[in-house]
Amino acid sequence: MKIFRNPDAMWREEDRFREQAYSGLDKGEDVSDTGTSIVLYSGKMFSFNLLGTEIWKLCDGKSVEDIVSELRESFEVEEEALRKDVNAFLESLKKEGLIYEK
């Protein structure tokens, strides 16, 4: 199955916060609470952290395995832990109607 962003969701990446998050990662800081993108859909606003933003950007027709593989190139984390996080995040996006599978 391929995963796609809902085309009705509007979003933007926050460059300044993305740079802060990557800088924090380089220093070994916990940046999980730093919002690096905003998504608007169905009267709701969502803020995604760095990993969430990167997952969101990869929801362009890739499979879960493709997403995990690409993220492994950018993040130093065990593959199983990353796969678990990716699947959990994708499930939450699906429940909100932000993504669909085809």
Image (tube, helix red, strand yellow):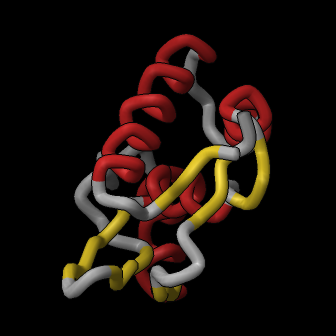
Q: Is residue 32 left or right of residue 76?
A: left
Q: Is residue 46 left or right of residue 6?
A: left
Which residue is located at x 48 percent, y 17 percent? Answer: 81
x%, y% of residue 44? Answer: 20, 80
Which residue is located at x 50 percent, y 34 percent? Answer: 86
Q: Is residue 62 placed above or below 38 in the rendered structure?
A: above
x%, y% of residue 37? Answer: 43, 76
State which quarter of the image contains the N terminus: top right
State which quarter of the image contains the C terminus: top right
* Residue furthest front as drawn: 102
The front one of 43 and 71 is 43
Q: Is residue 67 placed above or below 18 in the rendered structure?
A: above
The front one of 28 and 2 is 2
Q: Is residue 86 placed above or below 98 in the rendered structure?
A: above
Q: Is residue 1 left or right of residue 46?
A: right
The front one of 12 and 100 is 100
Q: Is residue 14 left or right of residue 47?
A: right
Which residue is located at x 43 percent, y 63 percent? Answer: 98
x%, y% of residue 12? Answer: 50, 87
Which residue is located at x 70 percent, y 39 percent? Answer: 67
* Residue furthest top as drawn: 80
Q: So how many labels did they put on this image?
A: 0
x%, y% of residue 88? Answer: 37, 32
Residue 43 sits in quarter: bottom left
